[in-house]
Amino acid sequence: MSDIQAVQWFPGHMAKTRRKITEDLKLVELIAELVDARIPQSSSNPVLRNIIKSKPKIVLLNKSDMADPVQTNRWISRYREEGTVAIALDSKTGKGMSAFFQAAREVLKEQIAAWERKGMRGRPIRIMVLGIPNVGKSSFINRMLAGSGAGKAEVRDKPGVTRENRWFTVGKGFELLDTPGVLWPKFEDPIVGEHLAFTGAVRDEILDMEGLACRLLELLSTLYPQAIPYRYKVDLMQESNLPGYEILERIGRKRGMLISGGEVDTERAAITVLDEYRSGKLGRMTLEQAISCDKS
Ligand SMILES: Nc1nc2c(ncn2[C@@H]2O[C@H](COP(=O)(O)OP(=O)(O)OP(=O)(O)O)[C@@H](O)[C@H]2O)c(=O)[nH]1
């Protein structure tokens, strides 16, 4: 994963973001940390997690429409065991937004009561929105803005659109502070870098797409053995532990992705597999499984 490591690290950018977030913490009552519901662990920035630990926080398991619902519930239980409120969210449709509004008021009920005692009833709750590149911060903000008549946050399907911290008045008693999505200097565990790359949080230009697709196929074959055969109509069920390259070749052949000499265009097949995984076409799958006491 050295290729991922090398290009994600923008020392100046990260240091500036850290400074700004630390400075702005005093302006907010609550943190909304967006993580990718398919990889809740790898998509949480450990550096920022440390900086914000003094503030109340709600974790939003975004893109939950693409994650395994059973796993998402387990993650929610696991966060609860750790004393953190977590909510499944789909920022594309807005599913989970009302649960978020309710949870925000619940988490801050003492603060709200204190404002009321001081004659500051109706004071908006100020929320800092945090999350790694491409996790859906702008989509979430736009959901909050919907109907408020305020401007829109820019949504792109490329990670790392840098921006300054910006305030949005979203109505419904909330104000949002948007922050730039940043990754951190060093992925201690190479799996973290890989999972971020699978889901599209790392810019593709720096990645070996073929190697990445092979590793994704191996992982999916272990976690969700039916998914690849179902989507690509390739028969893998009789053979366990097939190398990812073999699976990729079979997919390419099935899809007619051939180059001269009848060889499979594995580069093209890799891009297809990654694109289809990232857009949820392979089904609802969570790559990082939660271990919780509550196995609901
Ligand atoms: N399926 C699905 N897609 C989502 C969801 N939220 C965001 N997306 C998509 O994910 C991509 C990135 O969304 P953005 O809202 O731009 O993400 P961001 O965190 O603001 O990205 P940066 O600007 O890079 O920090 C876009 O293609 C969105 O349409 C969701 O809940 N479900």
Image (cartoon, helix red, strand yellow):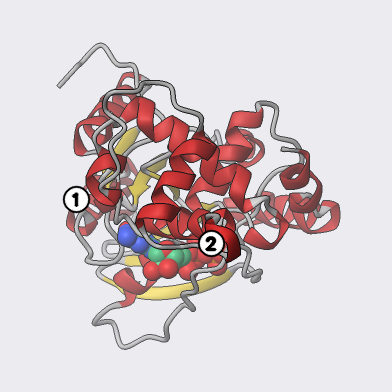
Quarter of the figure with residue 106: top left
Quarter of the figure with residue 191: top right
Find disc 2 in the rendering and name its residue: 268
Image coordinates of residue 159 in percent, x first then y, are 58, 63
- Which three-letter amino acid code belongs to the residue tagged 2? Arg
Q: Is residue 8 left or right of residue 21?
A: right
Give the residue drawn at x 45%, y 74%. 168
Q: Which mark is residue 248?
A: none
Find disc 1 in the rendering and name its residue: 99
- Local packing at callout 1 (Cα closer than 10 Å; few below 14, some 14-19, many 20+) is few
- Local packing at callout 2 (Cα closer than 10 Å; few below 14, some 14-19, many 20+) is some
SS for dot 2: helix
Image coordinates of residue 238 in percent, x first then y, are 28, 23
**Mark 2 or mark 1: which is in front?**
2
SS for dot 1: helix
Image coordinates of residue 155 in percent, x first then y, are 46, 75
Quarter of the figure with residue 204: bottom right
> Sequence-wise, which precedes: disc 2 or disc 1?
1
- Which three-letter amino acid code belongs to the residue tagged 1? Ala
**Most distant residue in the front direction:** 261
Q: Is residue 166 left or right of residue 296?
A: right
Answer above or below: position of 127 versus 59. below
Res 115 seen here? yes
